[in-house]
Amino acid sequence: MSEFRPIAHAAKDTDGAWRDPHDLADHLRAVAGLAAQNASRFKGADWAHLAGLWHDLGKYRPRFQRYIRQASGFEADAHIQGEAGKAPHSTAGAMLACKRFGVAGRVLAYLIAGHHAGLYDWFGGLDARLESQDSHDELDEALAEYPSAEILDHGAFKPDLREIPGGKDGFALWIRMLFSCLVDADFLDTESYMVAGKSARRGDWPHVQKLLEQFDRFMADKITAADPTPVNLLRADILRQCREKAHETPGLFSLTVPTGGGKTLSSMAFALEHAKRYNKCRIIYVIPYTSIIEQTADIFRAIFGEAVIEHHSNAEVDAEKENSKSRLACENWDAPVVVTTNVQFFESLFAAKTSRCRKLHNIVDSVVVLDEAQLLSPEFLQPILDVLNLLTKHYGVTVVLSTATQPALATREYFDARNNMRGLDNVREIMSDPDALYRALERVNVRLPIDWNAAVSWDALASEISRHGSALAIVNRRKDARDLWERMPEGTLHLSALMCGEHRSQTIGQIKERLKNGIPTCVVSTQLVEAGVDVDFPVVYRALVGLDSIAQAAGRCNREGRLDKGEVVVFVPPQAAPPGLLRKGEDACRSVLHAHTSKPLERDLFARYFEKLYHACNLDAQSIEDLLKVDGQTLAVNFRTAADKFKLIQDEDSAPVIVRYGGLDGSDDKVDELLNTLRKHGPERWLMRKLQRYTVTIHRREAMKLLSQGDIDEVMPGLYAQVSDWLYHPDLGLNPDGLPPKLTSCIV
């Protein structure tokens, strides 16, 4: 037996003196307790408790104990990396589980063996690892140190796979949920030892009741200050209905309200009232675009203050080069209000890595609002619908599909079964009469192309738009926005995702201020303006696109109902959308509207549009369903392969660049200070949040070109920063192609 008392971690105090080591048995018991507490909300406490007890069983082996003392494992990464030569220790518990429980023990093996490196595929991954001689040696060496009976005894635990939430179809999500419970418990208990006092600051969040009181005060002030216009009266009624329907039993809801009807705040009212009524833990607000998340987060922060966390991936580091500090840039979503993106939310639900999975158990017993639900990715729609059904049926989640253009998500069956869709059933509409709402909030006339095949040149379009005092033109691509903007008169404003979040926010604020004061304002934008950006133009031009996007564009026209009718002009742009989803949306739109003689935005058209769009798409293009299908005899699942393939945005093709945007005063000292802090201290969570506001994502090919030219440098693996002064234009944002076409700002 080792002459040392087995320890899990060691650390120094702020004065440089070593504190008492973290006792290994204490760590295992604490993690077991925390994991069980996390999993108790979905009846997984017994599984999670045993996973916690055995997750670091391999640390009893002398090899690890020598390493933690002699090889300077006195660092936060000591228990995380598990690299070759650093005393692997995460297999012994997995081996013990399989020996004790046979095939059922593989459930625990997935959790324990993956708690550092992430969930494995079974065949060619975890099965080979468990069969290796090194793994057998690890277990034998750990048991030879005589861990206490309290640690090794599994008590009355008898694994029963018949109790899996959702059965075979729910197995993969259940494993990821249990994995989340274990990983978060391990991080939190390690953190409580490694960083004195930090854990005491966690969890000090206001209760939902307090948030509801803050919200009610905010809304009372807002309603008092609002003019009693017909639009505002309708918004007040929408808010009332949301509050009333919040008392219905948890499950699936739709909130179908025309753009401009106040869905953001009304959906939050529903979420808060529902959370209070049914003791839900948090509200998770999911937004399709990173480019607009800041505005929604700012709205909620104005109401709830620091109870809101904003989590998206613009400034996350290379996942292959994570360390303890970079992991701190990822949240475990323990706050009561989380604002995140479709990418972050859904990729986490299908993830294998510890940093992504850690937050999953905090989705349990929450209210999830899917803002602009029509933008759920068609190529991943089937696995997304499957996981939403599992969350609402087995994990206490209430989901609200909030949009002006509800997608057709009910179950559908066709003669060709390959086109079938397992949909969301029993979805309850929150609005009592959406059709009446659409009639009441009809504020625009839509002019369609006379010839659907006749493209309009940018020059002709710019000339036509310029005749209006104020107008918004929305195009399909960043390059289109730049090409049209170049042809517009001096003073035209520009919005695209080539502008960092801080730049976009300031420009949107400027647009609103000019419109409010009656200053003629022309804007050229990509589709980022269509979701969550509350601007009100008398005229909107929209490049031909899917019908849902045309409706969203119409929501930026006569939004406040001050005109009898606004004007929306749909035009055929010089270049068709590239093959892919945009082209399929355009084709579905042509098909629905081509012979349509009535109003183009009638509500019943959207179901037909989405049915045509989804029929044209492979709703599980990456075969996620097959990868996550469990073999009942072996419990084999391809967790890692599925996670690698479930990418709503292909990360390997993109690169985040921190830009030196100095705001309207032209000073970029703030960005320089943040970058200096990043280089000196690494990716602290608060710092990465701030840097997100100054980050633009471009294609990796473009980033490599700029890097070779010395225009950017790599400040962290996979994260770049602007070097060249000319690279960021004050109107157009980042220009990865060359010198900007206009060297002076046109903003007046």
Image (cartoon, grey):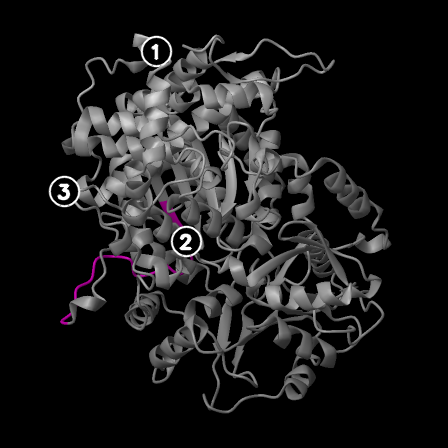
The C terminus lies in which quarter of the figure? bottom right
Q: Residue placed at 66% from the left, 63% from the top?
A: 498
Determine crowd level at label 3: few under 14, some 14-19, many 20+ residues with C-alpha closer than 10 A.
Answer: few
User: Does the CB distance between marks 2 and 3 fall below 8 Å?
Assistant: no
- Tag 3 secondary structure: loop
Q: Main secondary structure of the magenta part?
A: loop
In the image, 608 versus 640, the foreground residue is 640
From mark 2 to mark 1, how far is it between C-alphas? 39 Å
The N terminus lies in which quarter of the figure? top left
Q: Which mark is residue 633?
A: 3
Looking at the image, residue 195 sits to the left or right of residue 57; the answer is right
Q: Position of residue 586 (x, y in %)?
A: 42, 77
Determine crowd level at label 2: few under 14, some 14-19, many 20+ residues with C-alpha closer than 10 A.
Answer: some
Q: Residue placed at 55% from the left, 60% from the top?
A: 561
Q: Amino acid at mark 1?
A: Tyr
Q: Earlier in the sequence, mark 2 or mark 1?
A: 1
Q: Amino acid at mark 3?
A: Gln
From mark 1 to mark 3, how far is it between C-alphas? 33 Å
In the image, 4 versus 720, the foreground residue is 4
For residue 632, say whether it is visible. yes
Question: Residues in magenta?
Answer: 400-415
Q: Position of residue 676 (x, y in %)?
A: 79, 42
- Count the numbered circles shown: 3
Query: Which circle, 2 or 3, is nearer the viewer?
Result: 3
User: Does the CB distance between marks 2 and 1 fall below 8 Å?
Assistant: no
- Tag 2 secondary structure: helix
User: Does the CB distance between marks 1 and 3 fall below 8 Å?
Assistant: no
Q: Which residue is mark 2?
A: 644
